[in-house]
Structures are given as structure tokens and as C-alpha cells.
Amino acid sequence: MEDVFETIERIVRQMDRKMMEALRRIEEETERTLKLLEEIACRYEIRETEDGVEVLIEVPGIPKESIKVWASGNILRVEGCHEDRKVKCTIMLPPTLDVESTTARYRNGLLIVRVPRKRMKEVPIDG
């Protein structure tokens, strides 16, 4: 028959194993979460201009050729990757902007996307 101290020691070893397994799972999940955050984290600033907005997006270490920009509806999407760096952004824009006329330029790790305002047009009255 097992004495009390052996029982306690066995229980402590089992608890140690269970704790190590739990910590290993937590570490794996944390690494997956950090990778996901790195992919979706996007540093940007929206500045209002006279004729629309400028969206300044930080893309350090990613060459211009590796960056893609899409604009549709009131959504601006930017993706780029190079080696171990990744940028992925989805930015909601005000509906008053003309995303069909969006332009972008790249300079020193900064992507500058310009989106003009929609112009009011006069509507003729029939009759």
C-alpha cells in the first residue's frame, strides 16, 4: 500500500504535468494570436484635405511592388508582404468620398492614398 507521502508526490507530479501541458497550449495559442494581430494590425492616419481625405499607411520594409490597394464602395483595402513583414488593412471611409477616383503613392515606407470627395451635380428638372 502506498503511503501518504508517495500519494502526495504522485499527485504533485500529475499536477505538474497538467500545468505544463496547459502552459504549452497557452503559449501556442498566444503565438497564433500574435501572428494574427501582426497580420491585421495596421498603423494608419486619416487626414481631411480641401478636396477629400488622405490616408497615410505605414508599410515599413515592404517594397512598392509588393503592395496592393483596392477601393470599392466605402472600403479601402491594403495588403502587402515581404519576407517576414506583413500589412493587411481594411479601412472604412465616409460614403461622401469618390473611391473610384482614388490614387496612391509610395514614399519611404509610407503609402499615401488620396480619395476625393464626391462632387455635387446639378440635376435638370423635366417638364
Image (tube, rainbow, N blue to C red):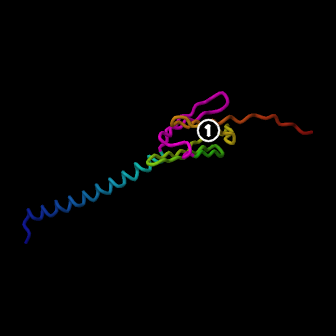
Q: Quadrant of the N terminus?
A: bottom left
Task: Report the front residue among 100 and 3.
Answer: 100
In this rendering, position of residue 93 left or right of residue 63: right
Closer to the camera in the image, 91 or 55: 55
| Nearest to the observer: residue 41 or residue 109 | 109
Quadrant for residue 14, please give it. Answer: bottom left
Residue 95 drawn above or below residue 32: above
State the image coordinates of residue 84 (x, y, percent, origin top left): 43, 48
Q: Quadrant of the C terminus?
A: top right
| Whole-percent x, y for residue 70 in the image | 61, 46
* Residue at disc 1, secondary structure: strand
- The residue shown at (57%, 37%) is 106
Task: Judge from the rendering whether residue 69 lies leftward or rightward of residue 37; answer left or right.
Answer: right
Q: Residue at x 27, y 59 (%)?
A: 21
The vertical placement of 5 against 59, above or below, is below
Q: Residues within 10 Å of mark 1 (few under 14, many from 20)?
A: few
Q: Which residue is drawn at the image coordinates 67% and 37% (left, top)?
A: 97
The residue sitting at the top extreme is 50
Please name the residue shown 65% across and 36% down the image. Answer: 115
Instruction: Name the residue tied to disc 1.
Output: 104
Q: Is residue 53 magenta?
A: yes
In percent of width and height, residue 121 lies at 79, 35
Three-letter code, disc 1: Ala
Whether residue 83 sits left or right of residue 77 in the image: it is left
In the rendered image, the residue lying farthest to the bottom is: 1
**Segment tinted magenta in the rendering:** 41-67
Tally the numbered discs. 1
Whether residue 75 appears in magenta in the rendering, the answer is: no
